Image: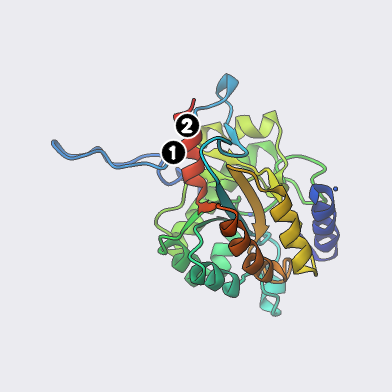
Amino acid sequence: MIAPVRRAAALCALGTALTACGTVKAPHAAHPAPSAGSAAPSRPPTLAPGPGGLTPVFKNGPRTDGKIVALTFDADMTADEGKRAAAGERFDNPQLVATLRALKVPATVFMTGRWADEYPVQARSIDRDPLFEIANHSYSHYAFTGDCYGLPTVTADRMRTDVERAYTAFRRAGVRDAMPYFRFPGGCYDQRALKALAPVGVTAVQWDVVSGDAFATDADAVARQVLDGVRPGSVVVMHCTRSAAPVTERAVRTIVPELRARGYRFVKVSELVGDAKARR
């Protein structure tokens, strides 16, 4: 997520504020032409560019397509946190992934390239499980705007490279099907960032429900915040990082059965994006 002392303070600020990391094309951006008589390969749904060709931004699905909700988990690791990982800090959360599997919950993992470099076996495992999909959270987890919860910033001329570098890291880890979705570190973006990423062809994915799990110590409070905020079509943002979000797995064990009892069905972000695209 963020650098040593500054990282903790910044993530705490992020949790508070939201509550009240080689130039190549992104996966799915191009496919070989199908041979004569063969069906064209299916591609994950993306939204059309915004005004002026800007990267489109998706926050939630249609509210009228029934009770569906997407749980998303940011697998954060900042580019400069290698020494902390080497010293034993855990930026992964295999128990959370195991719980999602046990509960049969589809989910979208927004992964930094640095995380995939650190945990390639886990990245491959997530990618090859049909319950999950992997999306892009930058390589560095540096901010794409200034004044974003204390995060270091990416200059405008490096924004596209940072996103493409993450896709390169995914492939290096053995991830074969990374999605054409991107989540801005800290959720911070502006017109300059949307313009810089337009050539990559991604849909920027935000959220409408904040779990408040960053550095939380009360799993019940996290669960309540999610349960109080979910509406049909919601996108919930949580974290898949043990050291920074230690109670997320316990909260999920409360959230999932309660939402199912309320009639909700869990889906991946791609399904919500597809629903939204069909309505445009």
Quarter of the rendering containing residue 261: bottom right
Q: Which mark is residue 144?
A: none
**Residue 24 rendering spot, x and y as whole percentages:** 46, 45
> For the residues marked 1 and 2, what is the alpha-carbon distance in whole angstroms?
7 Å
Does residue 244 lie above or below 182 as drawn?
A: below
Q: Residue at x 84, y 53 (%)?
A: 16
Q: Residue at x 55, y 52 (%)?
A: 263
Q: Residue at x 44, y 58 (%)?
A: 171
Q: Which dot, 1 or 2, sits closer to the camera? A: 2
271 shown above or below 74: above
At 80% across and 66% down in the image, what residue appears?
4
Residue picked out by circle 1: 45
Q: Secondary structure at mark 2?
A: helix
| Quadrant in the picture for the N terminus | bottom right
Q: Kindly check if marks 1 and 2 are in contact, taking CB atoms under 8 A apart as contact.
A: yes
In the rendered image, residue 268, in percent from the top left (x then y), is placed at 50, 51
- Callout 2 crowding tier (Cα within 10 Å): few <14, some 14–19, many ≥20: some
| Amino acid at circle 1 | Pro
- Residue 49: x %, y % from top left: 53, 27
| Residue 229 x, y percent position in the rendering | 71, 48
Q: Can residue 234 be seen at all in this image of the molecule?
A: yes
Please say whether residue 215 is visible from this viewpoint.
Answer: no
> Is 21 displayed left or right of 243 in the figure?
left
Q: Secondary structure at mark 1?
A: loop
Name the residue carrying label 2.
Answer: 277
Q: Is residue 207 left or right of residue 214?
A: left
Quadrant in the picture for residue 99: bottom right
Report the front residue among 19 and 120.
Answer: 19
Labels 1 and 2: the sequence-earlier one: 1
Which amino acid type corresponds to the residue marked 2 in the rendered image?
Lys
Whether 47 is drawn above or below 233: the answer is above
